[in-house]
Image (spheres, rainbow, N blue to C red):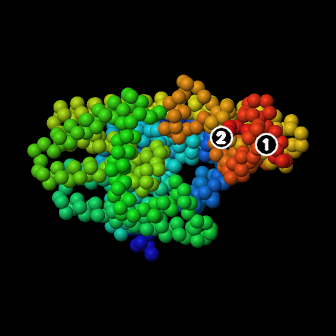
Amino acid sequence: MMPLLQKSKTAARDWLQGIDTALLRTVAAAAALCMLLAHGFAFTNLFPNHDSTVLVFDAQWTMYVLGRWAQNLYFPLVRGKIAAPWLIGAFSIVYLALTSYCITSLLHLKKWSAALLTGLLGTCASVTAQLATYTYETDAYLLACAAVWCTERLPRLWGYLGAAVCLCGCLALYQSYIQFAVGLYLLLLLQRALQGAEWRHWLRQGVCALAALALGTALYLVSLKVSLAVTGYRLADTGNGLTQLLRLGPAAVLAGIPATYGNFFKTLFGYSGWNDRGMRAATALLFVLTAAGLALRLRGRGGRMAAQVLWAVALLPLGLNVSHLLASGNVYILMQHALFLVYLVPMLLFDGAALTPADWKVGGVLVKLLCGFLILRNILCANGAYVYTKLVYDNTARQMTQIMADVGKLDGYEPGTTPVAFVGSFTDSQLAYHDPAFSRYEEGDLHQVNSAVTYDGTIKWWFQHVMGSSAAVIADSGTLIALGETKAVQAMPLYPANGYCAMVDGTAVIKLSD
């Protein structure tokens, strides 16, 4: 027993001594600075919108049927059930720093690359979309990167075991972040191809990566079956559910590959509310630098090395956007966080290891400047998004308070007893917030909405958690649709016209839209 303890103690001491403290300080400082500049407003203000109106974690059923069973264990035990913005921000900064350290240490990047990567991952549109509308999920992509670290740094058996556990945890928290592991494996293959890795060794590493991903997926599927068996739930057959994924066949996967590549480039180069003209131009220049860097690095090298490099480069868009393929195109920006790892490629190419001093200096400076510009634009976009979200929240809160005051004046209404029904769409009604100055955020690219209350579930959460109201609101879409089709409700005027709320067969009805 004592020799085993001594061996474990020695291994732990050696691991701690192997930590690059200077690199860790760099990524920690970059994470704190960039996250606070971009998201400090979100960390210090409360503006529940859309899914974030839940505020108190009570979505156990939803998480089980979506296959995210680990959230039901993690959030109550580690973060607590109350979605406290500052605590979420503190966790996110720590997780981002650890993730960046894991990636940069595996790829042996310089400090400037580590700082830029941290800034890009921490300020990108995916994070803004999460903090403005959803619960932050950095926990999941840290586990994805930790899985790659396990296969690279631990003995083979322990490496596979650790990777499988980490990948299972990643999938059980938020499935789309598996792309971080896939992308990082491909980036490692690209780097080793650039270093002249021998064919057999290079292919063996690719096979090992596939084996680790397969083991993690298998463990997740077993855990998923156990969670469903214990709870008695069934997987949701919805656009964001796993049932459609399990129905995918080889033909559907092959047919979806071109669209996955197309979506990758459309996301990076197409117009959207978060991707303005300057950002698209900077990304295009970084891709031009990438092509130039590849040409310089492959100059005078053999065809074998060129084939390895080009294979890794060709597969990278597919790996970083594999959720688009597996979800049959039903993706949005917060599921595509891993796409921004593509900016690591020019960093790898201009690290100075195999270029002339002039090529390295010029290319390296341009990469730094362009990535810094992207970080700055991301910070500006994030702050604008949070201001917009706060305005939407304030507008919804003000009008909902007035609506309930009007409902309280209806003859026969009893607070907490009389059913209250909001008929119609919140986002298509006069209750919604509109301002041309914020049109880029209202376009939906960041998954933001013009009303803090949206679908039926958010009605319940808004009254219960945000307003602290005991109103007996109806939060079932079927019931609300049926009520809206009655002649009495169809004859009612729309909010805010006189008579927009009335008692109909014992229910207080508020008509928002047709």
Identify which residue is drawn at 22% across, 49% down: 310
Camera-side residue of 408 and 62 = 408
Badge 2 local density, few (<14 within 10 Å), some, or many (20+)? some
Quadrant where the C terminus is found in the figure: top right
Q: Identify the secondary structure beneath mark 2.
A: loop
Q: Quadrant of residue 134?
A: top right
Residue 284 appears in the figure: yes
N-term mark: 1 or 2 = 2
Name the element at disc 1.
helix
Percent from the top left, x then y, of residue 340?
38, 42
- Establish if 65 lies above or below 28: below
Q: Are marks 1 and 2 in contact (CB under 8 Å)?
A: no
Residue 294, position as x, y percentages in the image: 20, 42
Question: Mark 2 is on which residue type?
Answer: Ser
Name the residue nearer the viewer: 295 or 415.
415
Mark 1 surroundings: few (<14), some (14-19) or many (≥20) residues within 10 A? few
Q: Is residue 474 left or right of residue 214?
A: right
Mark 1 or 2: the one toward you: 1
Depth order, front residue of 268/468: 268
Residue drawn at x 72%, y 34% is: 494
The dot on residue 488 is: 1
Work out which quarter of the rendered image holds the N terminus and state it: bottom left
Label 1, label 2: how far apart the Cα atoms are: 18 Å
Image spot of residue 365 (x, y percent): 27, 31
Q: Which residue has dot 2 on it? A: 425
Residue 133 drawn at (x, y percent): 57, 42
Tell me what residue is drawn at x 46 percent, y 64 percent: 246
Please tell me how many numbered marks the rendered image carries.
Answer: 2
